[in-house]
Amino acid sequence: MRRPTKARWVLRIVVVAYLFLLVIWPVALVAKATFAHGLGPVITALTEPEVVFAFELTISVAFWAVVLNTIFGVGISLLLVRYTFPGRRALNALVDLPLSVSPIVVGLALLLVYSGRTGWLGRTLESAGLQVIYAPPGIILATAFVSVPVVVREIVPVLHEIGTEQEQAARSLGASGLQTFLRITLPAIRWALLYGVVLSLARSLGEYGAVKIVSGGVAMRTQTATLLVEERYQQFGAANATTAYAAAFVLALLAVVALIIVTSLRPDKENS
Amino acid sequence: MTQTAPPPAAPAAAPGDRRRRGRAATSLGAASGLGLGIALVWFSLLVLIPLTAVLVQASAGGWSTYWSILTNAQTVAALELTVGQAVLVTAVNVVIGTAIAWVLVRDHFPGKRVLEVVIDIPFALPTIVAGLVLLSLYGPSSPLGLNWANTQIAVFLAFLFVTLPFIVRTVEPVLIELEPEVEEAAASLGASRFTTFRMIILPSLAPAITSGAALSFARAISEYGSLVLLSGNLPYSTEVASVRILSFVEGDNLVDAAAVASILLLVALVVIVALDVLSRRVARYG
């Protein structure tokens, strides 16, 4: 490269300064605010029953959303890559829709269908004894909705890349569909599947807008961790602020840990 | 075989002279057909039926009701703010996102790997926490002495934060694939660095920049969580489309909510279709 120095330095400084001002410094300030009075108040805040409940709810919701998305995500990916059927291209495009639809629209959409009072399916489900909206099933649906594309988008390129030769060989040697999937397809996509799971877990733990509409946000019943951060931040008093920051810090920490896991795993996949 | 035929058709073609293989194919076709059917039902129950419900609800009052909801002054103000800021943010991202991708791919300095993680933080961070994060530097207790909370600058900042990864992540892989030989050839033929960039690099990056821009626009107009604590949601001033929808939902006015939501849904659909067309044109899938 000719004359690399000056332009390169300017660009490097602009980029680092931009990221510092937009992401690094603000995130660091939140960490600082969380531990402004040491570790004690943070631990007290995080052991409050309401906080413990909110995190337990968030974790169990995220777990079920990820389980559902993993199973159906693999199914939809196989459908998109290995089969041709009318509407495949439309499905392929629609799978990405949850990433660009507003979480508020997601919440509204689920409310319209699953609300026990007016929903298309909600009334039937309610009379069968299953409350969806303002209850954990609704929160799981909202969380699963927004992270559907994550698993699919990780797996689809890998399925394209590995092709069908090995699967066909296995089948021609008499392996059943399930055997072929478990012994050929699954090992080939395992890394992509793992990223998908970690990323959708991170996303599920932090879902807020869609959950806000379908959960009702009642403390100790349907209040998830993100809803708790909002409620506490808007209430007055230092104790509430500490709780908001502590919960936000834990959520941020989980997100960053998930990111670091995925970033450090990626090269492994490329080598294998 | 099963690749070119829809799953239910595969077993019908299979049974013939070779029994064992035929039977294996049959059970495979039936089992995977069933599994894939369930996946589709799940996707419909989760995504397609609810989104259809929004459109049905929006059209419930007829065209004139729909139009009067959308021309309500407060709704117009919210939509204008949302689209205006989203366009602005996307324009900024086109420049800075491409620059960041360039630095991450072509430049080498200690700590570059940290920046890789930093780029993805806005994507992974819960949006409510993103609002809190921005508030710490640009809110009332800012160490810089800025207080942009509850202003339109706050909306701009929130959009800028949540859309950071999109263009970087779409441009980066293309830049990695780009052969440096072509640029060297251009340079050796006397092209200046700027000419090389404009004539060689930019055209190759254009599709990636376009799709990143579309994604970041779609993300910006649908943003909600990071604004809750940051922008104050003041009508006619910092209220964005999502907040407008939410206040309709909270007032149990689902027709109005669905009408505004249908606009956001439509924009998301347009973006998705445009991206699909673009990626097909670039990759020539067929």
Image (cartoon, grey):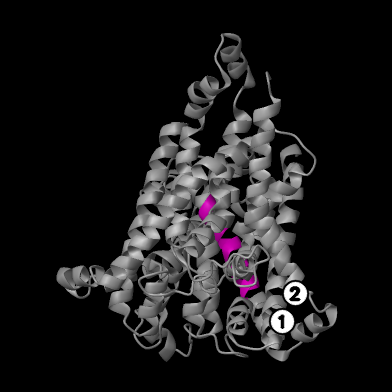
| Picture coordinates of residue B211, whole percent (x, y) | 46, 43
Tell me the magenta residue range.
A61-77
Q: Do labels 1 and 2 share a chain?
A: yes
Task: Residue B125: give x, y in percent of width and height.
Answer: 63, 63
Label 1 chain ID = A
Label 1 sits on a secondary structure element that is helix
- Viewed as shown, does residue A196 lie left or right of B222? right
Q: Which of B101 and A126 is in front in this view?
A: B101
In the image, taking residue B62 as reference, residue A61 lies left or right, namely right
Q: Give the left or right position of residue B76, taking residue A102 as reference.
A: left
Q: Position of residue B197 (x, y in %)?
A: 54, 25
Task: Tell which of B153 and A27 is nearer to you.
Answer: B153
Using the rendered view, name the quadrant where residue B124 is placed.
bottom right
Res. B70 image quadrant? bottom left
Tag 1 and tag 2, C-beta contact below 8 Å? yes
Residue at the spot of label 1: A242
Give the quarter of the image for residue B84.
Answer: bottom left
Q: Is mark 2 on a helix, strand or loop?
A: helix
Q: Which residue is drawn at 64% across and 66% down?
A: B133
Q: Which amino acid does label 2 sit on?
A: Thr
Query: Quadrant of the image for the C terminus of chain B?
Result: top left
**Label number found at residue A34:** 2
Q: How many numbered discs?
A: 2
Q: In this view, does A158 lie above or below A112?
A: above
| Residue A130: in magenta span | no
